[in-house]
Amino acid sequence: MGQLSRPQGSGGPAMARFVLDLERIYGQMDAAYRAASGQAGFDCRGCAQNCCRSLFFHHTYAEWLYLRTGLEGLPLQKRQALAAAARDYLARKRPGDGLFCPLGDAERCILYDHRPMICRLHGIPHILVRPDGCQVEGPGCDDYYRQRGQAVATALDRTPFYAAMAALEKELRQAIGLAAARVKMTVAEMIATPLPVSIAPPDPDPPA
């Protein structure tokens, strides 16, 4: 990851607009996913191959900020327990080992409303039109085809959501001077790694 800076005036409160903008984009994603899965007759829950056991990487500071904002809203003891669970996950994980995400509690996500983009869009077939005009097609998960057979309903078009996320991320990086820095993190790493000071949400439990 590149060198992180702390531009004047870019602390937690200044990030509130980016959090609200991402919340709006996530709401649009969720609505599109519900519509596509409903049209396909696909019910995403209770499958043996739980996607929370998949090794997903996330690539934006915006998602990291939003996840940590949700995390900071939890009681201190819960945050400490999740940080310990994330460190344990990172110490034990191996590609393909199927460890459950550290946010899982009885196989339910503790920060479901703050989960990253791929956690919201995974499971149903999709298309994505790249900036060069090339269209990429992605399959659904195994349970999608178990429920539906090989017939595929209209694929979810992820293009507008990726474009909106890219625009927001660009604006966020410019605001905090991180244009060259890259992100490739699991949820566990997002929990275990402090945000750059310039975008960290305020500490909900300041010292007395």
Image (cartoon, rainbow, N blue to C red):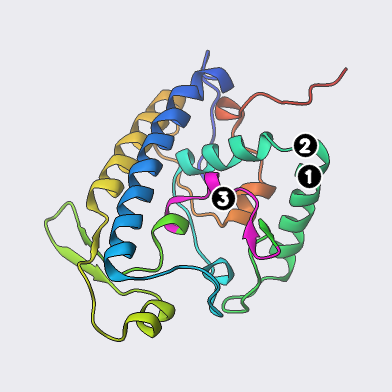
Q: Is residue 114 magenta?
A: yes
- Give the residue pinned by disc 2: 75
Give the residue type that dot 1 points to.
Lys
The number of numbered discs placed on residues in the rendered structure image is 3
- Determine the image quadrant of residue 167: top left
- Give the residue pinned by disc 1: 78
Around disc 2, counting alpha carbons within 10 Å, would you say few (fewer than 14), some (14 to 19), or many (20 or more)? few
Residue found 55% across the figure and 73% down from its top: 46
Span colored in magenta:
106-118
What number is the disc on residue 31?
A: none
Sequence-wise, which precedes: disc 3 or disc 2? 2
Residue found 43% across the figure and 51% down from its top: 117
In the image, residue 97 sits, relative to residue 202, either above or below, namely below
In the image, residue 142 sits, relative to residue 63, either above or below, namely below
What number is the disc on residue 112?
A: 3
For numbered disc 3, what is the local secondary structure? helix
Q: Nearer the viewer, residue 152 or 122?
A: 152
- Determine the image quadrant of residue 201: top right
For numbered disc 1, what is the local secondary structure? helix
Rendering coords of residue 21 (x, y %)? 39, 31
